Amino acid sequence: MLPERTRRILTTHVGSLIRPDDFVAVLEKKEAGAPYDADAYARLLEHSVTAIVRQQMETGLDVVSDGEFGKTMSWSRYIQGRLGGMAYRPRKDLAGIKPGEAVAPGADRRRFPDFYAAYDKTQNLRIPLLDAVCVGPIKYVGQAEIQRDIANFKLALARAGNIVGFLPVVAPASAIPVHIEEHYKTDEAFVFAIADALHEEYRAVIDAGLFVQVDDAFLPYMYDRMVPPMTLREYRAWAAVRIEATNHALRGIPEEKVRYHICWGSWNAPHTSDVPLKDILDLILTLKVGGYAIEAANPRHEHEWELWLDTRLPDGRVLIPGVIAHTTNVVEHPELVAQRLVRFAECVGRENVMGGTDCGFAQGPFVRRVHPSIQWAKLAALVEGARIATKKLW
């Protein structure tokens, strides 16, 4: 169960934390297909998860994650190795292109091409040079990996004193956001097949006694890719199918054990073409989850807190606004964090707010959005800001 939420503002974060250098060095070999010691990797993974959980606890966070250390490639593409029915073929349009040089164009990239040309060189992005192709029935084949992640995390939680933990998992919309179809007759059939497969992963986390966080950055991000030429109405129809599929993936799972996270992507760039929260909030609130973790500290979206003045939070649900940004190495002042938390509490009720972060401090194993020391300073500011907000609200 969660710690008492009616006496103070609790703290958490989105899930992805910066991996230690020795762990990344092994992952580099693993992802490159180079020889590596699998047993040593397993031991290092267990040790790294234990260490990251302990550091979260010592920082003062109430609800912690495994740092997503069990995930390879990225927060979403990890699922590629856990789904049967998919094949990956070289992209014909990228002949001669090197990893990190090809990113799917969206409206923001078209508006600021010179910026992105320089920016991409600094990000160590691992852009896939393969097309995802659905060649047969989608099925979940990641049982061993999810059980390994669960076991490592539960061991780490026990060693830290049995604090509360959540595992991040990918949403149907973000699992395979773009693909070539060679099996299913409709887009909806494919999306719901993904949802059926992901249900098994979600269920495994819940059955292990953990909380689950469904990550869905692609739901808002695809607006930047789709509109124009699509209209907002057409985009919402696309998104509505994926919201319905997420509920399908969550069928039979207690709502209070689930939270849903959206952001507009972890890259620190202009974001001038993001879908406004007001255009998707009604869809998000139909999800059968206990909490909504929504980016709110990013200067492109902080103003959207005003939506909660006129939006009713469904009964029994918790708002987890991001009050710490991943987009800058500037450490938020705890008083600012407290102001943000109080603002949300005055909108939806102090007992219905938990302090969170906008996005992960690492997009995956190889992309750091802030320096590791800044990550911990920001999380400490979140904890102190929650203490200040608690004094003001109680």
Image (spheres, helix red, strand yellow):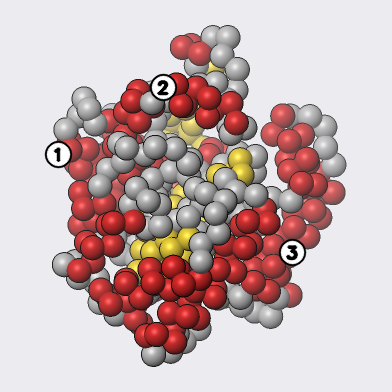
Q: Residues within 10 Å of mark 3 (few under 14, many from 20)?
A: some
* x 63%, y 56%: residue: 374
Q: Give the camera-side residue of 210 and 375.
A: 375
Q: Which residue is mark 1?
A: 233
| Residue count near mark 1 (Cα–Cα under 10 Å), binned few <14, some 14–19, many ≥20 | few
The mark nearer the N terminus, 2 or 1, is 2
Q: Is residue 64 above or below residue 89?
A: below
Q: Position of residue 384 (x, y in %)?
A: 54, 75
Q: Quadrant of the C terminus?
A: bottom left
Taking the image as shown, residue 311 lies to the left or right of residue 363, namely left
Left or right relative to 318: residue 325? right
Residue 88, given in percent of the width and then of the height, sits at 53, 25
Q: Which residue is mark 2?
A: 113
Q: Identity of the amino acid at label 2? A: Pro
Element type where label 1 sits in the image: helix
Q: Earlier in the sequence, mark 3 or mark 1?
A: 3
Q: CA distance from mark 3 to mark 2?
A: 40 Å
- Would residue 393 appear left or right of 211 to someone viewing this image? left
Neighbour tally class for label 2: few under 14, some 14-19, many 20 plus, Cα within 10 Å: few
Amino acid type at mark 3: Ala
| First in sequence: mark 3 vs mark 2 | 3
| Gap between marks 3 and 1 measured at Cα | 46 Å
Amino acid residing under circle 1: Arg
Residue position for label 3: 51
User: For the residues marked 2 and 1, what is the alpha-carbon distance in whole angstroms?
Assistant: 27 Å
Q: Position of residue 118 (x, y in %)?
A: 53, 24
Q: 85 or 232, which is in the foreground?
A: 232
